[in-house]
Amino acid sequence: MYRIGKEEIDAVARVIESKELFKVNGGKLQETANFEAELRQKMGCDYAVLMTSGKAALISALVGLGVGPGDEVIVPGYTYIATAMAVIAVGAIPVIAEVDETLTLDPASVEANLSPHTKAVIPVHIQGFPSNMNALKKLSEKHGFAILEDACQADGGSYNGRRLGTIGDAGALSFNHFKIITSGEGGAVLTSRRDVFERAFIYHDSSAIAYFGNQLDNVSVEPFCGNEYRTCEITAAILREQLKKMDGILADLRSRKKAIMDALSGEFSFRPSNDIEGDCGVTVAFAFPTEEEARRFATAPGVHGVLPIDTGKHVYTHWTPILEKRGAHHPLLDPFKMPVNAGLNHNYSKDMCPKTLEILSTTVYVGINPDWTEEQLAAKIEACRKAK
Ligand SMILES: Cc1ncc(COP(=O)(O)O)c(C=O)c1O
């Protein structure tokens, strides 16, 4: 969470005073409908659906794309576990691929892991680093898989001038506490595909749409049983204020990241970017020849660095329920035990992505705060320089 205050307090008060906290037919304020319209406009896509979390958005988008049992979905071995769990939640099998030096999904590894069962690929814009969307789009056009962008750590970032989450067939945003904009918890599906929107929309609120209001008007997909990922008007009201702040937060993150990289470029190496202009500026990724050097730098006074290899459930080696194939609470719902998935690629091991582990062990993240003063920024640069 970066910037939250009086505007959000007033927005919450406005909703409570209206006594209309339910989004469906929700009174005069229509906070959710307004937020979704504003998000569509800001991001540049035809549809946006607000829901309870980024994982809910990933699952709903996969449902929207028609992913299910019998399908493989390629995910990077470096992402929050929720990305891979979302695949399992729809009955499909996550295939774990390498990241490259940009810390994002390696298109060569995607190609190496393609099979006749590959239904979708999920590039993850981790730490706001844009994935190599051109290369992935080319592969998707050649091989016919769908792209679902996991932009949960990259709200508002872009690639070649287009907002992350709107370049593939669908995208997922998160608004949890740690994200660029936040309502504590929350997420959204972005898409410009009508079929994906309708299916994701039905799935995210499959009980309510049958009973409340006219939400099913103009929907051509037959309603099916899904989930309940609906949010309330307070969430939307907070996010409307957060959305107004998003580009300012990104500009301040980016300018501070650039200042650090410019000041230290002669002395350090950095991980390359697929689009440094669109990068969210959340983190400077320093590159070192060895893990030992990386650790020495990370722990030097004032640096406060983190090696991504130490970030627990962001590294596939820590995805224990997946590696050990416990895919559901009931065996008949467990994709790893479904006969239709028996021949798919779920041969996991802790050493299956050696390149990813090497890159994560020799990278140091230095996190940026968009509210750093000139003095604080200069102190951070100085601390890094001394740690050389
Ligand atoms: C890359 C990534 N994907 C998905 C998620 C899931 O988002 P949420 O916590 O909102 O469900 C997160 C959350 O941290 C994430 O970092």
Image (spheres, grey):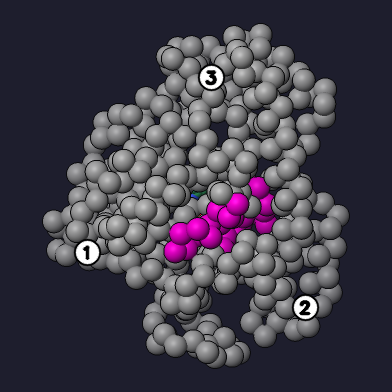
Regarding mark 1 in the picture, which secondary structure is present there? loop
The residue under the point 34% across, 38% down is 98
Q: Tell me the residue that label 1 is attached to.
A: 70
Q: Is residue 15 above or below residue 77?
A: below
* Residue 364, x across and y down, in percent: 53, 24
Alpha-carbon span between mark 1 and mark 3: 43 Å
Please tell me which of labels 3 and 2 falls first in the chain.
2
The residue under the point 52% across, 44% down is 130
Q: Quadrant of residue 280?
A: top right
Horizontal relation, residue 19 to residue 122: left or right: right
Amino acid bearing label 3:
Ser
Horizontal relation, residue 342 to residue 297: left or right: left
Alpha-carbon span between mark 3 and mark 2: 50 Å
Please tell me which of labels 1 and 3 falls first in the chain.
1
* Residue 272, x across and y down, in percent: 50, 31
Quick check: can you spot residue 203?
Answer: no
Q: Is residue 230 above or below residue 127?
A: below
Between 242 and 263, the residue placed more toward the observer is 263
Q: Which residues are magenta?
A: 161-188
Q: Is residue 280 magenta?
A: no
Q: Tell me the residue that label 2 is attached to.
A: 29
Amino acid bearing label 1:
Gly
Quarter of the figure with the C terminus: top right
Between 262 and 248, the residue placed more toward the observer is 262
Regarding mark 2 in the picture, which secondary structure is present there? loop
Q: Tell me the residue that label 3 is attached to.
A: 269
Regarding mark 3 in the picture, which secondary structure is present there? strand
Amino acid bearing label 2:
Leu
